[in-house]
Image: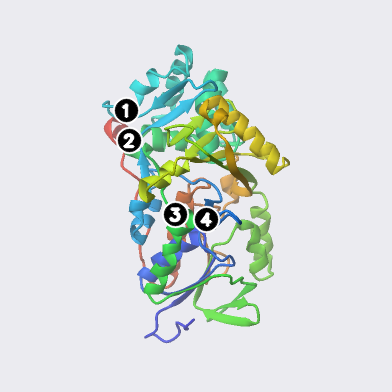
Amino acid sequence: MSSGSATHLPLSVAVLGGGLAGLSAGCALADAGYQVELFERRPYLGGRASSYELPGTGEVIDNCQHVLLGCCTNLIDFYYRLGVEEQIRWYDEITFILPGGHSSMLKPGALPPPMHAAPSFLESTVLDLMDKLVIARAMLALVPALPEDDGESFLSWLLRHGQTQTAIDRFWSPVLISALNDELDRVSVHYAAMVFRESFLKSAEAGRMGVPAVPLSELYGTAAQYIEARGGKVQLRTAVDSIRPDADGVGVCVGAEAVRADYVILATPFSSVDKLLPDAPELKALDDELQKLETSPITGIHLWFDRQITPLEHAVLLERTIQWMFHKSKILATRRGSTEGGSYVELVVSSSKTLLEKSRAEIVELAVRELGEFFPAAREAQLVKATVVKEVHATFSPLPGSDAFRPGHASPWPRIFFAGDWTATGWPSTMEGAVRSGYGAAETLTRSAGRNDRFLVPDLPAKGLMRLFE
């Protein structure tokens, strides 16, 4: 990597980590004229949002199903930057199914926000009248403003606002556990309210759900070409051992080689930060804070059946261990053609602590049995193959008070900057939070370099009556 000490040469930036935070930072800086070199220890890009070929099958699977919402403005901007926006399949409706197959759909209607989904909500048959009344009352409490994190859990808030157990089990929990990847008694009021206010209430566009229609590594692998087309480099299978800042730049130690850069963006998981930074009092203080962040697992269960088990492309599965069904053979077929008569589904279990000690065979048996309760055709179908992917440290938990432990993008070392969904983005641990962190770190770096490049894009504007509360 070239030095930026000569004024005619572009400033050089080493990005450590090829997840969404590192990719978004690297692409933004490469586009702004910086010389970017990105290091990723794995043979593929995407980090926790990646895919790989399942040995012996020829099947390419995502490590876990990732979705986005219309309110994810920076992630959507990143897709447009890479030119992959057409590879996202958008949905305006969500189907909720009870065991036995009874279902209801939530979708926007003609009323202005925040009432745009009210007609379909009122028609729901998975909730009774009392459930709907208490949910509506709680939603109205979220309309005026986003509550601060005062240390209360969202479960406590729900109980304080008179929610029935059915309302919690069939509405609040399915949405929030999937969005925030933890139980309601471990989620701050601020982030739980953000999910509903930003997506359900603000506008119909904000609540649209997007699902990648190609494997994740194919989606994000285009970032390598993007950086390289702008004079940068992407080094896969390259682990960085340590970084050593000095007055003139940063030494990036890769095995026996020391690469020089003007700046470094550290975009690794927060658990590995202390392994890379120089041993100093500043590191201990930082590490003490990061150690207070907790993580939560996600489990993806991939099942291939010999026949179609449902016409649905996705659904929320209520009151069982499995929580979401994504009909991958149909979702991928929207871009790739034939489903070839069978069903490939991915079942997602967020906050899957109860599955960590279970074997693959136990999880598959549980999943197939429960799937048959929602889709009777699955009971008659033959399971052709199956696999289970456990992401033990999938996200950090949005515990009440946890924002106090999330650092900003600037570090105690002037030439080193932090990116990752664990930084102080104002968002929970999501793909949107990761991209916001990458763009934010890139902006902070450019200010340090004497420029003021802007990469972060605004939130979606409120529509309808919600404009009164902007």
Q: Do the residues labelled 4 and 1 touch (CB within 8 Å)?
A: no
The CA distance from mark 3 to mark 4 is: 19 Å
The amino acid type found where label 4 is placed reads: Ser
Give the alpha-carbon distance from disc 4 to disc 1, as whole Å.
35 Å
Mark 3 = which residue? 436
Q: Which mark is residue 386?
A: none
Residue corresponding to mark 2? 203
What's the residue type where badge 2 is placed?
A: Ser
- Extreme residue toward the top, this view: 129
Specify which label sits upstream in the sequence, 4 or 2.
4
Residue at image mark 4: 50
Mark 2 falls on what kind of element? Answer: loop
Pick the front one: 83 or 433:
83
Q: Which amino acid does label 1 sit on?
A: His
Pick the front one: 369 or 42: 369
Q: Do the residues labelled 3 and 4 touch (CB within 8 Å)?
A: no
Asked if the residue at tag 2 contacts the one at tag 1, i.e. Cβ–Cβ closer than 8 Å, the answer is yes
**295 left or right, relative to 221:** right
Q: Distance between the residues labelled 1 and 2?
A: 8 Å
- Nearer the observer, disc 4 or disc 1? 4
Looking at numbered disc 3 in the image, what kind of residue is underneath it?
Arg
Circle 1 Cα neighbour tier, 10 Å, few/some/many (<14 / 14–19 / ≥20): many
Which SS class for mark 3?
Answer: helix
> Which residue has dot 1 on it?
116
Q: Residue sitting at 52 percent across and 23 percent down?
A: 98
Residue count near mark 2 (Cα–Cα under 10 Å), binned few <14, some 14–19, many ≥20? many
Residue 304's x, y, as percent?
54, 42
In this rendering, which labeled residue sits more in front, label 3 or label 4? 4
